[in-house]
Amino acid sequence: MDTTPPSVLSTDPIKDSAAIAVNKEIIITFKEYVETGPNFRNISLKAGQVPVNGITSKISADKLKIVPPVDLAYGTCYTVTIPKSAVKDASCNYFENTYTFSFTTVKLGDLNGDDQVDILDPLWISSRLGPVVDPASRKADVNGDNVVNILDLLEVAQYLNPSTGS
Ligand SMILES: [Ca+2]
Ligand SMILES: [Ca+2]
Ligand SMILES: [Ca+2]
């Protein structure tokens, strides 16, 4: 007989990760199949200290997926909270302890995903000039006109921090 309560195996994004895409789906994987528990609707996502309203939480087998109503904000720390009893296993063992993890979204203008907005980002774009042909050039097409050109470079240049010194 199963007397072990469900516990978290992994999260995607990984706890404390940075430069996460703003359209990322949040997935929590448990060590076993889970079902909704009495606190399921209290699963929350916060941007800083502010709750994100209208999230959708869905369970499929051993995975809990949290879908925000709109894309996440750039350069923002998000915290996911799965309260005690939010899920249970097939033997009605309830999730015992509140589980929390945070991650930070990519900064606006950080194209290469190194969590810095600097000269490397326009350079990243300039190595992908031309029509949009793959996921990388789609990302480099910042203004979404299906071609990577000087306009995209200018778009990103405005997010560059003014250089100090030298
Ligand atoms: Ca169990
Ligand atoms: Ca960067
Ligand atoms: Ca463009």
Image: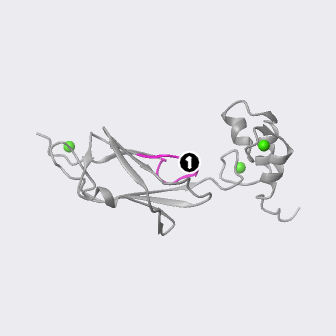
Q: Nearer the viewer, residue 80 or 31?
A: 80
In percent of width and height, residue 135 lies at: 66, 34
Q: Is residue 25 magenta?
A: yes
Q: Quadrant of the N terminus?
A: top left
Q: Is residue 99 magenta?
A: no
User: Judging from the image, what secondary structure is the residue with disc 1 in?
Assistant: loop
Q: Which residue is mark 1?
A: 23
The correct choice, above or below, for 63 with respect to 116 in the image is above
- Start and end of the magenta stretch? 13-27
Report the residue that reaches farthest toward the right. Answer: 166
Query: Crowdedness of circle 1 by 10 Å Cα count: few (<14), some, many (20+)?
Result: few
In percent of width and height, residue 166 lies at: 89, 61
Question: Left or right: where does residue 76 sit relative to residue 145?
Answer: left
Report the residue that reaches farthest toward the top. Answer: 133
> Please, what is the three-letter code of the amino acid marked with disc 1?
Asn
Query: What residue lies at 19% left-to-right and 46% top-to-bottom?
Result: 4
Query: What residue lies at 70% left-to-right and 46% top-to-bottom?
Result: 111
